[in-house]
Amino acid sequence: MLEKDGFEKKEFDDTADVYVINTCSVTDNADKECRQLVRRIQRRAPESMVVITGCYAQLKPKEISEIPGVDLVLGAAEKFNIGSHIRELVKGDSAKISSCDIEEVSGFNASYSLNDRTRTFLKVQDGCDYTCSFCTIPMARGKSRSDSIENVLRHAHDLATSGVKEIVLTGVNLGDFGKGPDGNKKNEEDFFDLVKALDKVEGIDRYRISSIEPNLLTNDIIEFVANSDKFMPHFHIPLQSGSNKILGLMRRRYKRELYADRVGLIKQLMPHCAIGVDVIVGFPGETEEEFKETFDFLHSLDVSYLHVFTYSERANTQALQITPVVPVNVRNDRNKSLRNLSYMKMQYFTAQHAGENRKVLFEGHEKEGMMEGYTDNYIRITTPFRQEWANQVIDWKI
């Protein structure tokens, strides 16, 4: 948007007139990182404008505005008017906050990344209507709303024309796709309809589904992916806990049995499919026995890798009322335990495919004479750099 407005993009380590920091607020770390980045900018370019957007900016605008060096704080809706806000800024004035109550946020703004022509992330959905007890996202991003299938297809055609080979579909709650820009159901389109429509787009070789809730990942979607040449055999499905008691405290919308059923069907139809799992350790009330339940459940599941999050307290979430609180050192030990399990899972998954021929999409970056790519089922391949392979799908023996 800023480039269309006449701005030129710089590397973060260059000196620029305006720095935009887009913040997460899923974990405590994002808040600290924001402060560190502002300090770095202040040291390098004290006359530059510093703009903070994103979830942290929506949740705690006043707190951010008091960080020395911040000039503008833009909430969930106002970030899309960033150009006009920047033109009105005067360095040295106190930080300006432009935000509104999250209940008032509506409208869907499509976006996609084009930094790397090989793979692009295409946002098709925003916001979330779920009320998980640990999560601030509904407070930061507003109610669930989506683009139309017609618009998504137009973006996919544009990306195909620009040479993109792989599209990763993203959203805050992707499987909830189908609610219009005002958050209401429109045309009864759903995520399965979107998947079927995208499968027919000429010029895009590969699609990935970034992350989808187990209760929204239907048998129809799994069966379609199993029979599609374009949708990759790769799912990322948040679990968060392998204990039904903890899932209840988290206010998740499924039990572990449903999760196991989803994994079972995927592996029955696509034994080669990669499955990634999000899991939170150290949630309030999680005893040693319940953590072991999660560990054993994950150990037994035919999944490929884990994204492990250490629970961190977030203001205004219901989890703050749950006791007993798990000590931070115990949370960290549990995190390490599951990360070790993840490493072993990925090693085992990769070893199962040794000697197979699979299709690899190589990226164009050269790093110390090497290049990287991913197989259809998300095994990372590293090989000496060859320019003619950049952004090409190559048959590869693992």
Image: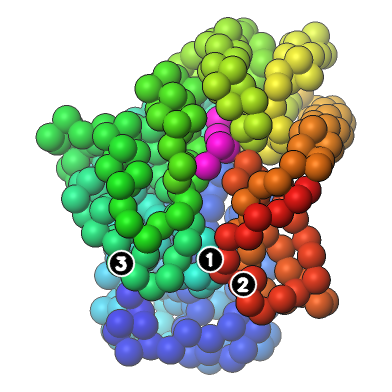
**Label 2 residue SS:** loop
Residue toward you, 296 or 43:
296
Q: Residue beneath label 2, please? A: 390
Query: Which span of residues is magenta-colored?
Result: 232-237
Residue toward you, 11 or 76:
11
Q: Residue beneath label 3, please? A: 158
Instruction: State left or right for residue 320 relative to residue 366.
Output: left
Q: Which of the labelled discs sits on residue 118, or is there none? A: 1
Q: Position of residue 51 (x, y in %)?
A: 45, 73
Instruction: State left or right for residue 121 relative to residue 234.
Output: left
Q: Nearer the viewer, mark 2 or mark 3?
A: 2
- How crowded is the residue under tag 3: few (<14 C-alpha within 10 Å), some, or many (20+)? few
- How crowded is the residue under tag 1: few (<14 C-alpha within 10 Å), some, or many (20+)? many
Q: Position of residue 61 (x, y in %)?
A: 43, 57
**Label 3 residue SS:** helix
Q: Position of residue 348 (x, y in %)?
A: 83, 32
- 273 inside magenta stretch: no
Q: Give amino acid for label 1.
A: Thr
Q: Could you tell me if the residues under marks 2 and 1 are in contact, i.e. CB atoms within 8 Å?
A: yes
Q: Give amino acid for label 3.
A: Asp
Q: Give amino acid for label 2.
A: Ala
**Label 1 residue SS:** loop
Residue at image position (26%, 79%) is 84
Total numbered labels placed on residues in the image:
3
